[in-house]
Structure formats: C-alpha cells, structure tokens
Image: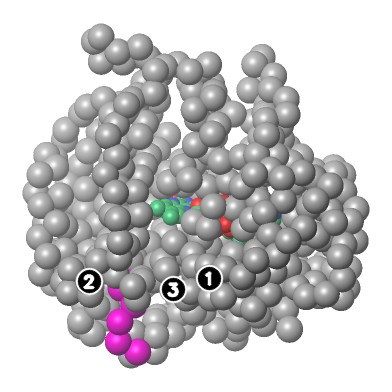
Amino acid sequence: MIWKPERLAGWGNHPSQLCRVARPERLRELRELSVAPGGTLAWRGLGRSYGDASLNAGDGVVLLGRLNRFREFDPSTGLLECEAGASLADIIACFLPRGFFPPVTPGTRAVTVGGAVACDVHGKNHHRDGAFSAHVSELTLLTVGGQLLRCSRREHPDVFWATVGGMGLTGCIVTVRLALQRVSSAFLTVVQRRTADLQQTMQQLATLDAEHRYTVAWVDGMAGGRSLGRAVVSGADHASGAPAGRGPLSPPAHRRGTVPFPAPNWFLSPTMVRGFGALRYHRSADGARYLADFDAFFYPLDSLAHWNRLYGRRGFLQYQFVLPEATALEGMTRVLETLHRAGHPPFLAVLKRLGAAGEGLLSFPRAGYTLALDLPVGPPELFALLRRLDEEVAFRGGRVYLAKDARLAPDLFRAMYPQLPAFLALKERLDPDGRLATSLSRRLGITA
Ligand SMILES: Cc1cc2nc3c(=O)[nH]c(=O)nc-3n(C[C@H](O)[C@H](O)[C@H](O)COP(=O)(O)OP(=O)(O)OC[C@H]3O[C@@H](n4cnc5c(N)ncnc54)[C@H](O)[C@@H]3O)c2cc1C
C-alpha cells in the first residue's frame, strides 16, 4: 500500500495537520497495513468529527471510505451487515425506499458506520432509543496483530464495550451488524414550541420527550440577559403518510448549495449571526405542526455543502458537553453567561435531553442535557476560557464530547471519564506496542 502525505483536518478545520494517508480498497490491504511494522496508525471515516480524533500528526491515517460494501440484509428483521466505511447516506439511499431508516442518526448523514460506532453517536432520540451502539448486535474488529475478532454482548464483550465509543483506539472496525428501524414514510410529523429562556427550553424538552420519539432545541445563541437560552424546541415522530402527490418513501429531491472556499474572517461577524439566530427564532411560530421530510428535520445543515468554510481558514470549535439533570440548568446558564460576558456568544447552539448511559467505557452520552456550541477559533484567550468551562463541567459531574473536541486537557479528561483505567487496561492488552494512536489520544494522554 502506498502512503501519501496529506494535510487533514476534522470538520471544524482546527487543527489542520500533515499526516501520511493510505486508502485500502480490500480487507487484505487493510490487514497488511495493520500488521506492517513502523509508525502509528489512526482510522478515518468521513472526517466529520470536529477536532483531532481522526488525525495523526506526522504519522499514518487509514482512510476507510472505500470499504463500504453492504454484505447482508434481512428484510424481515431490518438487520444489515455492512462494511464500516458505508455511510448513513449510503444506507438511507438504499434502504429508505424499502421502508428502513437508521435507528439513530447524528445531525449529518455524511458519517460512516465505523465512525458512528467509534464515537457511539447519539441522535435526537437518545431519550427513547439510546446511542448508536444500542442497535449494533455485532462487529468485527481488526486488531494491530492482524486478528479479526468478532465482538458482541456475548463474544468478547469487554472488547465490544471498549470499541464502542473507543475512538478507534482498540483496532479497526471492519464490519457492523446494525438493526435498521422500519418506517412507512420519509416524512415526520413535527410540533414546534418557542420558549423564552433556558429554564423553559429544558422544561419543554422534558415535556416533548414524554410524547415524541425525537426532540431537539435550536437555541438562539446570541440572545443574552433574560432571554438567555431561548429556543425553538421541536418534537417529531415518523409519519405514516406523505403530502398529497408524494410517494411516502421517495426521498425528497433537494437542491444543495455549497460554500466553494473558506470565507474571509469578517464574514461571520457576531452582528450578522445575531441576525440569523433572531430570524430563525422569530420566524418559527409557537405551536406550529407540520410535515417535514427527513432531510429537513434531521439534516438541515447538510443542505449547504462545506458550510464549515463559513468560519474561515482559522476554523471553529464545537464545545459539546453533557450535565446531569440536577446541575444542568445552573451549569449551562453559567457556561452561556461566561461566553456572552467574554464576547464569545455561540454562533450555533443545540440543546438535547439524553436518556440513561450505555455501557461503552468511553461513550459520551449519560442522562441529562447536552449543549453543543459553535465558536469560531479566534483570540487565544478563548482556549483559556474553555479550560475554565471544562472545570465547571467536570465539577458538576459532566463531560465533554470527544468527537467534537480539539483542546481538552488530560487532567480534566480523566476526571470526566471515570472508566478510563478499564479502557487503558484493555488497550494495553490489544495493542501492547502502542501502535494505535491519534492526535487526540496523544493530547489526552491516552497514548504516549
Ligand atoms: C454537522 C454535524 C452534526 C453532527 N451531529 C452529531 C450528533 O447529533 N450526535 C453525535 O453524536 N455526533 C454528531 N456529529 C459528530 C459525528 O457524528 C461523529 O464525529 C462521527 O464519528 C463522524 O463519523 P466519521 O465517519 O466522519 O468519523 P471520523 O470523523 O472520520 O472519525 C471519528 C472517530 O472514529 C474513528 N473511526 C472511524 N472509522 C473507524 C473504524 N472503521 N474503525 C475504528 N475507528 C474508526 C476515528 O479514528 C476517529 O477517532 C456531527 C458532526 C457534524 C459534522
């Protein structure tokens, strides 16, 4: 296999690092790469983690997008076995017309199944359906020794729970058995509420959670003072039909725009973004009920390709953390107020309510509220400020999401992820020479 130098970045375009990349097309090639001596190895799906989770500065990154075949599908159960480089977009394109949809989806469909397992991603239905791993019955893991391990809740369960949410550090996920959910429509029935502040937003999410499969709050990140945390909160369920004249299972044909190059730094000024945030909030009618196609509901950001370029060459950070129910209101108020006071109001802010934690040793979701905030990379004091916010989050029993992270420090990471010692013991067993590493794992002290 040929390694080529390539500068890589996550979705936030920060950091951007020179790595060596290889792009296997067959399992045999992947195996050769994983057993060949020399250097460390990282895996990369579609690079939709925001920070440095799929980077390996100066060293090897294996691009897995071509190992994306569907291997087996049982229409009577919805059980799909696919290679881990298959994306949710591939799955939707093939299986939605047959009446199946991913059981859990993040806010973009441009993620691979392997990336979804490695980050144990959550969707807008975590309160009902848990994280991605809850729907994975089995996976095969290629270890650095070249062994293919079949892992499930019964076979090698310790490896299974370290791999789920394990950020690619136990081996390469090669195939996954995933239970798709049956749907009878590509549309969702949506109800919408407008709230006045953060407390109301949280209350609305809790109320809508009891009634709906999917819930999410798009917070007006620029609103401060008494309006801090005001939002448009939606609850949704798969519909049984479609608008007149539309086939219920035919995916909508949207025209997608694109951002062709990184925007200049002045482009996303706070004034401009305040305008967008306020517009979205005021344009959404309280109590509205409507049918939305799955694209518009699940993936509104996918409608503009490369929208991350709007943040310019310096890129942006997504600060996503979860806090338990008991400390969430106070903690999130503190985080938002601190950012506003320091002149860094979030450009995009999404709040969700999560259900009980799964068993993944490094999985992010746990019961409580999770807030995701987009912040342009700019002045250096932002990083010091976020360190202070990390301390607040850890103190209140929460944690930062590694799939979004580019800057957390090792001491706070250890405080936030109490099952790290068990994970490290298992990694040592599977990878005694420390060949699997990423820029994130080195930064957090998971690997040397
Ligand atoms: C617009 C947007 C919205 C998002 N919304 C959400 C959301 O709602 N919920 C949520 O949980 N996440 C969300 N994410 C994050 C995203 O779902 C995760 O980062 C996901 O892991 C990206 O998949 P990927 O294939 O791009 O993985 P990459 O970013 O390429 O890799 C992510 C990690 O997985 C590892 N990995 C990838 N493939 C494999 C493999 N086959 N074997 C072993 N390890 C592997 C990599 O080494 C890396 O550590 C969002 C991201 C974007 C850009």
* Circle 2 residue: 264
Q: Is residue 220 above or below residue 241?
A: below
Could you tell me which residue is drawn at 37 percent across and 31 percent down? 294
In the rendered image, residue 348, in percent from the top left (x then y), is placed at 28, 61
Task: Give amino acid for label 2.
Answer: Pro
- Label 2 and label 1: CA atoms lie apart by 21 Å
- Label 2 and label 3: CA atoms lie apart by 16 Å
In the rendered image, residue 220, in percent from the top left (x then y), is placed at 20, 59
Looking at the rendering, the stretch of residues picked out in magenta corresponds to: 375-380
| Front residue (pair 313, 159) | 313
Q: Quadrant of ligand 1?
A: bottom right
**Disc 1 residue lies near ligand 1 with CB under 8 A:** no
Q: Earlier in the sequence, mark 2 or mark 1?
A: 1
Circle number at residue 14: 3
Q: Is residue 265 left or right of residue 136?
A: left
**Extreme top residue here?**
245
- In reply to whether residue 401 is colored magenta, the answer given is no
Task: Give amino acid for label 3.
Answer: His
Quadrant of the snapshot with the N terminus: bottom right
Q: Is residue 95 above or below residue 140?
A: above
Residues under numbered marks 2 and 3 in contact, where contact means CB atoms less than 8 Å apart: no
Q: Earlier in the sequence, mark 1 or mark 3?
A: 1
Q: Is residue 62 above or below residue 214?
A: below
* Circle 1 residue: 7
Q: Earlier in the sequence, mark 2 or mark 3?
A: 3
